[in-house]
Amino acid sequence: MGALLGRLGEAAASLLGVCTLVFLLIHLVPGDPVAAMLGEGARAVDQAELRAALGLDRPLWTQYLDYLGGLARLDLGVSLHSGRAVTALLAERAGPTLELAVAALALAVVVALPLGVLAALHQGGWIDRVAMGFSMLGAAIPNFWLGPLLILVCSLWLGWTPVSGRDGPLSLLLPALTLGTGLAAVLARMVRSSLLEVLGEDYVRTARAKGAGPARVLWRHALRNAWLPVLTLLGLQFGALLGGAVITETVFAWPGLGSLVVESIQARDYPLVQGAVLVIALAYLVVNTLTDLLYLALDPRIRSR
Amino acid sequence: MSAPLLEVEGLSTTIGAARVVDGVRLELARGETFALLGESGCGKSMTALSLMRLLPPAGRIEAGAVRLDGVDLLRLSEAEMRRVRGARLAMIFQEPQTSLNPVMRIGAQIAEAVRLHAGAAAAVDARVLELLRAVGIPDPERRAREYPHQLSGGMKQRVMIAMALAGDPELLIADEPTTALDVTIQAQVLGLLKTLQQQSGLAVLLITHDLGVVAETAERLAVMYAGEIVETATTAAFFAAPAHPYSRMLLESLPTADKRGARLAAIPGRVPPLDRAFTGCRFVERCPRALARCVEQLPPWHEAGAGHWVRCHLWDADLVDTATVAEPAVAEGEQVPVGEDAAPLLEVADLKVHFPIHRGVLRRVVGQVRAVDGVSLRLRPGRTLALVGESGCGKTTAGKALLQLIAPTAGSIRYQGHELAGLSHRRMRRFRKDLQIIFQDPHASMNPRMLVGDVIGEGLQALGLARTRPERLRRAAELLELVGMPGAAVERYPHEFSGGQRQRICIARALAVDPRVIVCDEPTSALDVSVQAQILNLLKDLQARLGLSYLFITHDLSVVAYLAHEVAVMYLGRVVEQGRVEEVLERPRHPYTRALLSAVPVADPRAERRTLRLEGDMPSPSAPPPGCHFHPRCPEARPECALAYPEGRAVSATHRVHCILVEAEG
Ligand SMILES: Nc1ncnc2c1ncn2[C@@H]1O[C@H](COP(=O)(O)OP(=O)(O)O)[C@@H](O)[C@H]1O
Ligand code: SF4
Ligand code: SF4
Ligand SMILES: [Mg+2]
């Protein structure tokens, strides 16, 4: 119970930290943000007008309080480019990204778990070597290379899937594959090493000494312990997944937050950049808090501390 | 005699290139306790795991037969073997801490064993509770719902036993079942095994390195050395007249009170590596009585008495008459009665070390662990004061606080009249040279990437005693010779040495700065008895030559009896009894000291069995019981005991006891 409250307290503190950093983002850009937004050669009046509209002419701490107040009302300001509310734009783009992330994660887990378990059970055998070979390859290929490669083969040569855009379940396949491959590779390795370590533990020997068969030893004893470190890794890898989403979405013209970040940066649409970064950071925070809570639920040793 | 329950013949097991079990032959009768005895690395565990067919991945059984009730287990299929494991043949292990699944409830782990062999699903829960009760776990309903980390080490070993009993086995293999436990808990667990055995007619194959445990529990035994059995006998015959030189030396290397003043018979060297073929006796390099034929010919089995077999050339027909000639008596060491009345070198008064317990996000202090709670000691020049107690009673913390390695919470530590408590790092430097420490684990206390010479020279450099490296290396080489190692070892790395040699290096390091006092924190607990004897001999020699004072921290009362002049017995952060060794060990007055002494197994089957056994575990030092800390476990406790901490009462000028029962004679 104490551990649970502690973890939630930590999450709340990081939340405030993230919001503050995102707020400061606009002030950390070298030079004058307004000049940067309007481009060179803009008129001084226009600059002053924009500065006033964004509230950049007021003291920093009033801006900060306003920003926090806005957050509390779910008001992130207005996009400079389209004039629409930032929250509305984010809401539109969050769905597709969530869809992509979940698909990539599911794909990674479905491939990596059996691969890692099989590799561990046949340590040193050909299954192990093939699995780890794939894993090495998967971890080495960058998304900006794998994406176009998949488009070339599956869409252009074979014509199985659409080249880009979000149109039906089939269009999800290639982006999810691109995004999930790296994660699957890391995950398979982790599952393998964690399971190998657990299989050497004394309590596994105890289970065998009881007369338990290999399936029972694996499911009831080994895997239940081997998950724990894998779970932590999964939480941490979620950050890499979000980073990968920016590239993958751009390659496949997937209308998600990642491509929104790229578009808004290109358009120097600062409120939108701010909003998108905030949402991505929040997603990371939420996922990590959730994995930690799950860990608490699964590991009695930490729970009682 | 009816057919034996277990017959092992010609069992040979390899791990990679090493033949760790070689031609082992054993026979166990129903209901019998049979001990397999030997130092670590001799192949005892691998023999046990071969019987269970649970060898590590690289292990292979090369030859032999393991017949349980006439059925050769080595010929069963793996599926058939699974029906034997846990049902007819069960096993418990040395490390209860790691042998239970940490994410599964105790009850579920036992229930699994019940289901695997009994079936009858309806009665499983009742059977789990019955088993927990049978192994003496209080409040079994609650315990069944707990996880392993919520139980003490002794409780976990009880759970392991409950699990092993679930399938009603005929034979229980217990691999060092009490080695990781404190003596009072060891006595509980061994007592439990004996009771269970009497109730159910279970046979026990007890694997141990502890001659005392063997003498107290086993009916017959076999001695294992370097993968081979070298002697087998009834326990009585073995202890009356051990036939193999190795067995004799093992017994002689045990520290005991009657060997005070004498050197222990240490066995030089160590067990040979097992990845080579042996042409002669495996013990030849360490045997003081080796003959020419021992190098070339494998010694055959000889009968040394009824049912007493030994594998040694000394029993060859042409030699047997001289074989029984007594070993040369060990040289009497000179006993110098130094320092008995000298002024104390180190005087500790009311030392307290409390560690705060932090909780929550704000790390608030919610309590104190009273690791050391009012300890007073006196160490005189040239003498050894033993600080003895079970794990967690605060011995190590007291030793470290004494050297200012941990800041004491309260109390005074006077060294030659100078107060050390609260000294700044810089002011303490002056005294660092005089006060040194050696630790239990010689592996962990040395930087593996430093040469031995630099490890030893470190202190010289830090205290500015030898400025150049050649100078330090020269001094290090001298010190190595002093502790009985070749000076050339300065050029090598710590990992190239065995545990005993590493402990010698640690001693050399402590000696480098020419100290007056050495705190020895369990320096021999990780070592085998024969190596322990080498280190104890060395410490004794050094004391006689250099006039060192030792604060010797240990849980082992036989080491205390052998080595120490004075002893202080600790329980839960406090000293409950202290005095000269003869007084405290021969005429103990505190009930805890008495219980501790009676729990120590004696390596002599004829010794009378003291039956004082403590119940329960030591409470946590964060919530010590009020009054006398010992009262919840004290067999003689009365209501007043819970009221106040008993004052120290003098039984003699040197003997003080903290117990209300002692008052009358004060
Ligand atoms: N898992 C293992 N892998 C390789 N060698 C091992 C393993 N376990 C034990 N050994 C080796 O087998 C020999 C016998 O060990 P063991 O049976 O554990 O001895 P004991 O139980 O008598 O202490 C030793 O040389 C040891 O180093
Ligand atoms: S056979 Fe020889 S070397 Fe071996 S124990 Fe006997 S006397 Fe010693
Ligand atoms: S004071 Fe009481 S409880 Fe403590 S040891 Fe003496 S008799 Fe036992
Ligand atoms: Mg062992």
Image (cartoon, helix red, strand yellow):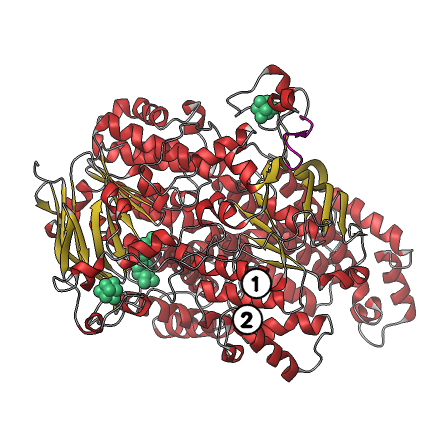
Q: Which residue is mark 1?
A: B542
Asked if the residue under mark 2 is in contact with the one under mark 1, i.e. CB atoms within 8 Å, the reply is yes
Task: Using the image, determine if residue B13 lies above or below residue B391.
Answer: below
Task: Using the image, determine if residue A106 lies above or below residue B279.
Answer: above
Determine the image quadrant of residue A243. bottom right
Tag 2, which secondary structure? helix
Towards the viewer: B374 or B601: B601
- Marking on residue A142: none
Which residue sits at x=39%, y=38%?
A: B157
Q: In the drawing, does residue A57 fall left or right of residue B53?
A: right
Towards the viewer: B466 or A110: B466
Instruction: Residue B626 in the image: state x and y as whole percent.
Output: 65, 25
Neighbor class of circle 2 (other Cα within 10 Å; few <14, some 14-19, many 20+) is some
Q: Which residue is mark 2?
A: B482
Which residue sits at x=63%, y=84%?
A: B470
Instruction: Residue B96 in the image: state x and y as whole percent.
Output: 40, 42
Q: Chain of mark 2?
A: B
Tag 1, which secondary structure? helix
Q: CA distance from mark 1 to mark 2?
A: 9 Å
Neighbor class of circle 1 (other Cα within 10 Å; few <14, some 14-19, many 20+) is some
Q: In the drawing, does residue B31 fall left or right of residue B91?
A: left
Towards the viewer: B439 or A28: B439
Say what amino acid the circle numbered 2 marks. Answer: Leu
Q: Which residues are magenta?
A: B646-654
Task: Using the image, determine if residue A252 lies above or below residue B566.
Answer: below
Say what amino acid the circle numbered 1 marks. Answer: Leu
Residue B289 lies in magenta, yes or no?
no
N-terminal of the pair, mark 1 or mark 2, is 2
Instruction: Residue B508 in the image: state x and y as whole percent.
Output: 57, 68
Asked if residue B340 can be seen in this view, the reply is: yes
Q: Chain of mark 1?
A: B
